[in-house]
């Protein structure tokens, strides 16, 4: 555990995205994913579950596309409460005519992968109970094995796919393309206060608070030293890291500033960027 640890209850909050066509994106996230529009202001639509916003979609018709081979969002991951809820997500995607880009059994979780109309990566997953997770020493054992989709669909409850996603659905983690794994580890662990959970996955690192398998994944699969995309590009604007503790936010802000990271503080929140220029916001909740 890092000396400057964030509280064990720290979690990922909402993910803020830049999209080209706001109405197209709202239609996709409602129809294909089962999210609901829970509010809109200033050209930003908030999409969520059970009244809680999971995504903030900012419509920017002139936003440049994110170039291939750059840093940014690899995917954001929507965590559903149960395996039947994952079955409902799979059936909902099929009914909407969406094609998966992948489906994996990660040992700690079962996951579906796809892209939104702007090409933004999405994971939808359910966790296995922590009592079923295996460890290699202090490292959580994770893999990418084929997922039995028929087994998932066998748990589909009648009419579930026609309903919005279940209350309790939330953002479980974000996975980022970065330029340098070592620099990302120093930043997210030594400065911000998360802990490494998996470092043996090729070209990637996974970190979390409270022993979760990962709240943030980073990878260099776009190449070591990958450049940042143009400012304001389609994709990630920022993600939220919710600590549940005002003092923890203030202490983390101090560590960021001491390490030379520019921070912007207002209304109890702290905005900053990681070494690969991925934006995030610290807040208590």
Image (cartoon, rainbow, N blue to C red):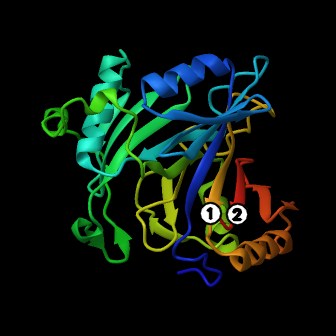
Q: In this image, 68 relative to 274: left or right?
A: left
Residue 153's place in the image compared with 170, above or below, is above
Nearest the eye: 14 or 219? 14
Where residue 181 appears, x then y in whole percent?
59, 56
Residue 242, disc: 1
Closest to the observer: 251 or 229?
251
Nearest the eye: 233 or 201: 233
* Residue found at x 70% / y 63%: 283
Image quadrant in which you'd find residue 24: top right
**Helix, strand or loop status at disc 2:** strand
Q: Mark 2–mark 1 contact, CB under 8 Å?
A: yes
Left or right: where 167 falls relative to 132: right
Q: Nearer the viewer, residue 9 or 196?
A: 9
N-term mark: 2 or 1: 1
Residue 232 in view (yes/no): yes
The answer to whether residue 263 is visible is no
Query: Residue drawn 59% across and 40% down?
Result: 55
């Amino acid at each position: 555990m890092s000396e400057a640890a964030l509280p064990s209850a720290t979690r990922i909050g909402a993910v803020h995205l830049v999209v080209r066509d706001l109405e197209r994106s709202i239609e996709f996230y409602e129809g294909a994913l089962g999210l609901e529009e829970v509010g809109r202001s200033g050209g930003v639509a908030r999409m969520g579950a059970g009244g809680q916003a999971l995504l903030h979609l900012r419509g920017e018709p002139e936003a440049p596309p994110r170039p291939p081979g750059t840093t940014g969002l690899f995917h954001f991951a929507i965590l559903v409460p149960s395996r039947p809820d994952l079955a409902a997500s799979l059936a909902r995607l099929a009914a909407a005519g969406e094609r998966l880009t992948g489906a994996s059994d990660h040992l700690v979780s079962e996951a579906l992968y796809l892209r939104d109309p702007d090409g933004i990566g999405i994971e939808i997953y359910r966790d296995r109970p922590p009592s079923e997770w295996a460890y290699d020493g202090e490292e959580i054992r994770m893999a990418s094995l084929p997922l039995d989709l028929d087994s998932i669909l066998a748990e589909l409850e009648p009419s579930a796919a026609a309903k919005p996603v279940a209350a309790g659905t939330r953002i479980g983690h974000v996975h980022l393309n970065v330029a340098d794994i070592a620099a990302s580890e120093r930043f997210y662990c030594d400065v911000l206060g998360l802990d490494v959970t998996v470092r043996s996955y090729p070209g990637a690192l996974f970190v979390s608070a409270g022993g979760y398998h990962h709240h943030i994944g980073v990878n260099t699969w776009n190449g070591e030293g990958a450049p940042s995309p143009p400012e304001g590009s389609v994709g990630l604007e920022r993600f939220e890291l919710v600590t549940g503790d005002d003092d923890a936010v203030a202490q983390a802000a101090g560590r960021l500033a001491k390490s030379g990271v520019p921070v912007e503080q207002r209304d109890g929140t702290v905005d900053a960027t990681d070494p690969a220029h991925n934006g995030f916001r610290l807040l208590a909740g």
